[in-house]
Amino acid sequence: MTFTLFGKANSILCMALALVGCSKDAAPPPPIAVEQAPAKLEEAFKENKGKQVDPEVKRLMDESVAALNSKDYAKALFTLQSLLARSDLTPPQSDLASRSMLAVNKALDEQASNGDKKAQEVLQFRRATK
């Protein structure tokens, strides 16, 4: 009898832990408007408490901003992806780059659904290489 009761207690504990593990924090960050992304990226990648941003990170951020400003969302997608692959981003930088990438994906989806062949190809390529 004790073994069965202990087994039920373990089952309840496991279910409780599973529910706690499924918090709202696990959801992807909300995208920002694609028009806001360039200014927000520039702000996030400014010098942080006197520390200079790595030159390669700055180059990728500058390329992302330029691509976003010129509405070259295909290039923005890949430069943001390269930026996110860096391990030396701060959490706010990583968060903003992720949110910007979500905005770019949304813009590409809209272009693709409006018949833009380049956007369709970029999205197909990205899905195939994920």
Image (cartoon, helix red, strand yellow):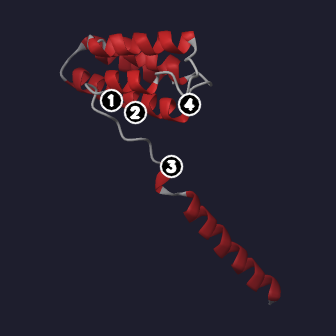
Q: Secondary structure at mark 1?
A: helix
**Disc 1, disc 2: CB below 8 Å?**
yes
Q: Residue 84: where, in percent of width, then height?
A: 52, 24
Residue with the most extreme bottom position: 1
Q: Residues within 10 Å of mark 2 (few under 14, many from 20)?
A: many
Quarter of the image where the N terminus is located: bottom right
| Cα distance between the residues tagged 3 and 2 | 14 Å
- Mark 3 or 4: in front is 4
Please tell me whether residue 94 is drawn above or below residue 72 in the rendered image. Answer: below
| Cα distance between the residues tagged 1 and 3 | 19 Å
Reading the image, the residue beneath label 4 is 90
Question: What residue do we see at 48% from left, 20% from top?
Answer: 81
Mark 1 or mark 3, which has the lower sequence index? 3
Mark 3 or mark 2, which has the lower sequence index? 3
Q: Residues within 10 Å of mark 1 (few under 14, many from 20)?
A: many
| Cα distance between the residues tagged 3 and 4 | 19 Å
Which amino acid type corresponds to the residue marked 1 in the rendered image?
A: Ala
| Residue 9 picture quarter | bottom right
Query: Which numbered dot is residue 103?
Result: 1
| Residue 10 picture quarter | bottom right
Query: Which numbered dot is residue 99?
Result: 2
Q: Is residue 122 visible?
A: yes
Which amino acid type corresponds to the residue marked 3 in the rendered image?
A: Ala
